[in-house]
Image (tube, grey):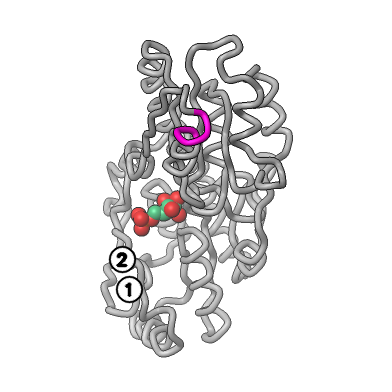
Amino acid sequence: MNAAIRAVTRAAIYEGWKVYGIYRGWEGLIMGDIKEFTSSSVSNTIQRGGTILKTARSDEFRTPEGRTKAYENIKKFGIDALVVIGGNGSLTGAQLLASEHDVPVIGLPGTIDNDLYGTDFTIGYDTALNTIMECVDKIRDTANSHDRIFFVEVMGRDAGFLAQNSAIAAGAEAAIIPEDQTDIDQLASFIGRGIRKSKNSSIVLVSEKDGGAMHYAERVRQEYPQYNVKVSILGHLQRGGSPTAHDRILASRLGVAAIEALNEGQRNVMVGVKNDQIVYVPINRAVRYDKPIDKELIKVLSILSI
Ligand code: F6P
């Protein structure tokens, strides 16, 4: 987040524009919690987790009245365009504001879930992925020493990108993700593959949706009582810490591209990256469509976890 705020601020100042930082997202726009940003406002921030602008959920912005209040502050501060950094909720808000009021909006995909359509990666995803991988590497020591099955629950809301790819990166035995909820029972298929055929321990990454790791651990306790099962829920560990190089570079590129988009007169698009090239996707498409997970990843994990 901070690398993106820094890039947007500096790229806009580079163009000779005035920049305001809006604190606590839509809530801050409604309250007028807005301050001018200079180049030094974003010094020493690229390596920091969280967001220097803070963030908040805003119930008021969900109402047309709330959005009108926000627009009144946009006019009051003489703001000509907004750059919104966030996930599905923030960008849906951006879309609504832009459809009701005359303000150009550019979105930047900022979420650890990587679930925004139209971009290969979202800002924060790679950092969370690396954090999960490091945690699983540590959990593996106990799994191995004690011959246990670990169900490790990770975030992702409705999407399984974090679970699937961290399972591959950490050499886990399986991932249980929402996108793979077909008729095949993922737990039964994992057990059926013979979890102890060649190994004495197993690690399964589980998406948080639908009961998450607890649900599957409970099922194993009931249905396969011979196994020693443990659960680890990684929680907000996944959302903190210093960003990876990949995330810092992505955020820097997307932030600069957001200002270029405004310069070119684009509005109501999300800036993304596809095949390492900058792309612009209408915000309504980015939030409306589900981003599919590459089925190849499911195959790779199942081949490598024999
Ligand atoms: O969308 C990002 C995310 O971290 C999800 O993966 C998770 O479900 C949710 O936010 C957690 O939100 P909160 O911190 O409000 O509990």
Placement of 152 over or under 97, stated as above or below: above
**Residue 112: x, y in percent?**
47, 47
Q: How crowded is mark 1: few (under 14 residues within 10 Å), some or many (20 or more)?
A: many
Can residue 222 be found in the magenta stretch? yes
The segment highlighted magenta reads 220-224
Q: Residue 62 carries which label?
A: none
Determine the main secondary structure of the stretch shown in magenta.
helix
From this viewpoint, is residue 161 visible? yes
From this viewpoint, is residue 112 visible? no
Which residue matches tag 2? 24
Observer-nearest of 120 and 166: 166
What residue appears at the point 67 percent right and 65 percent down from the top-left corner? 285
**Residue 196: x, y in percent?**
56, 15
Disc 1, ligand 1: is the CB inside 8 Å? no
Observer-nearest of 145 and 107: 145
What residue appears at the point 49 percent right and 48 percent down from the top-left corner? 156
Amino acid beneath label 2: Arg
What residue appears at the point 38 percent right and 23 percent down from the top-left corner? 139
Image quadrant for the C terminus? top right
Picture quadrant where residue 79 is located: bottom left
Observer-nearest of 281 and 233: 233
Name the side, left or right, on which 240 lies relative to 179: left
Q: Residue 27 carries which label?
A: 1
Placement of 79 over or under 172, stated as above or below: below
Q: In which quarter of the image is ligand 1?
A: bottom left
Discs 1, 2 touching: Cβ within 8 Å: yes
Amino acid beneath label 1: Glu
**Residue 81: x, y in percent?**
48, 73
What residue appears at the point 31 percent right and 50 percent down from the top-left corner? 42
Q: What element carries label 1?
A: helix
